[in-house]
Amino acid sequence: MTPGTIGRRRALVLTGAALAATACSHGGPGRGSVSGQASVRIVNTAGTFAATLQQLMRSRGYLEKRALRPEFLSVNDGSQIIGALISGEADICTASGFSQVFPAIARGGDLKLLAGSELLLLHLIYTSRPEITKLKDLEGRTVGTGAVGALLYSIMIALLRKNGVDPRKVKFVNVGSSAEVFRAVAAKVVDAGPAEIDYEGEEAKYGLHGLADGKFWKGLPEYTNQASYASQRAIRERRDVLVRTLAAYAELYRYISSPRSQDAYVAARALAVGRDQRAEALKEWNFFQQHRSFAVDLALSEERIQYMQALNVSLGVQRAMLPYGQVTDMSLARDALRLI
């Protein structure tokens, strides 16, 4: 994963052009307008996938086509996204995990979910232990994840429960990110753990294998990987900018989901990470072609929202379910689709 941090007052700006724009990017609803373009600050968690989408968005120019001048901000985790949105350091998160949004709203956080993004999990459970071939075999074993309530921890609990495996019989170890979990599994620090599909098909090179029932996109399709969200203040003050931003991302999702995007996606990943990763890029791109996992219509259904909340409640991350209308504002997505 590509590292990224955000300070108390300002996030790390990934877009080179944004450095010159920062001086005029603070102000009211029309801030940062240069030659008819409005500034929009987009925050997401750091990582290769996020950086690839940002690079592809830059190369395709969908935001500029909507008279927007983007600044891409990169942070380490969802709590920092929420901090950036509520403080006004960023206008919108376009594609990130969002389970942390619900407890934030319950505590009075000024946030709304706006749209779906990449819906399916791109994770597979890897192990170095030949005797571990299925989820049931993880009982009594160590499994690397993130912290309690983090994405990797939550999806492991959900998948185990769904397959009749008691999570209390598994020892979870907070390793960190998906890439760190993979390294820990390969080094036999933990017995198994979830990581992204970049390594699928190359497990033997690392002395690993994937679990047949450990493919999250098949075993846990109801879990929503990423969504877009913003503060209610930004919705009130910068609604038109947010609508145009969502329209640009809907165009990006449709392009990635089309066969003509292959070379552009591979090139974008190479630029994002600073080296050629054609094999890894093609695994992701083929996944998107096969599973059509992007929300090309920006939809984020009530069923998906309720599932994520119910999982939060079961994990003790959230006290009670919140009404769909309290946590979402899908009117911006509907307006965005009218622009395409």
Image (spheres, rainbow, N blue to C red):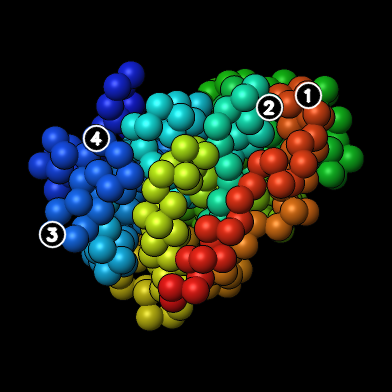
Q: Which mark is residue 26?
A: 4
Q: Which mark is residue 106?
A: 2
Image quarter (top left, top right, bottom left or bottom right) of the C terminus: bottom left
Q: Position of residue 183 (x, y in %)?
A: 47, 33
In the rendered image, which residue does mark 3 sit on?
A: 35
Alpha-carbon distance for marks 1 and 3?
48 Å
Alpha-carbon distance for marks 4 and 3?
17 Å
SS category of the residue bearing label 2: helix
Question: Is 294 drawn above or below residue 225 in the view shown?
Answer: below
Mark nearer the N terminus (2 vs 4): 4
Residue at 10%, 42% in the rendered image: 20
Give left or right: position of 80 versus 158.
Answer: left
Alpha-carbon distance for marks 2 and 4?
29 Å
Mark nearer the N terminus (4 vs 3): 4
SS category of the residue bearing label 1: loop
Quarter of image, res 9: top left
Q: Which mark is residue 319?
A: 1
The reply to whether the C-beta atoms of the residues labelled 2 and 1 are less than 8 Å apart is yes
Alpha-carbon distance for marks 3 and 2?
40 Å
Give left or right: position of 293 versus 263.
Answer: right
Amino acid bearing label 2: Ala
The reply to whether the C-beta atoms of the residues labelled 1 and 4 are less than 8 Å apart is no
Alpha-carbon distance for marks 2 and 1?
8 Å
Mark nearer the N terminus (3 vs 2): 3
Amino acid bearing label 1: Arg
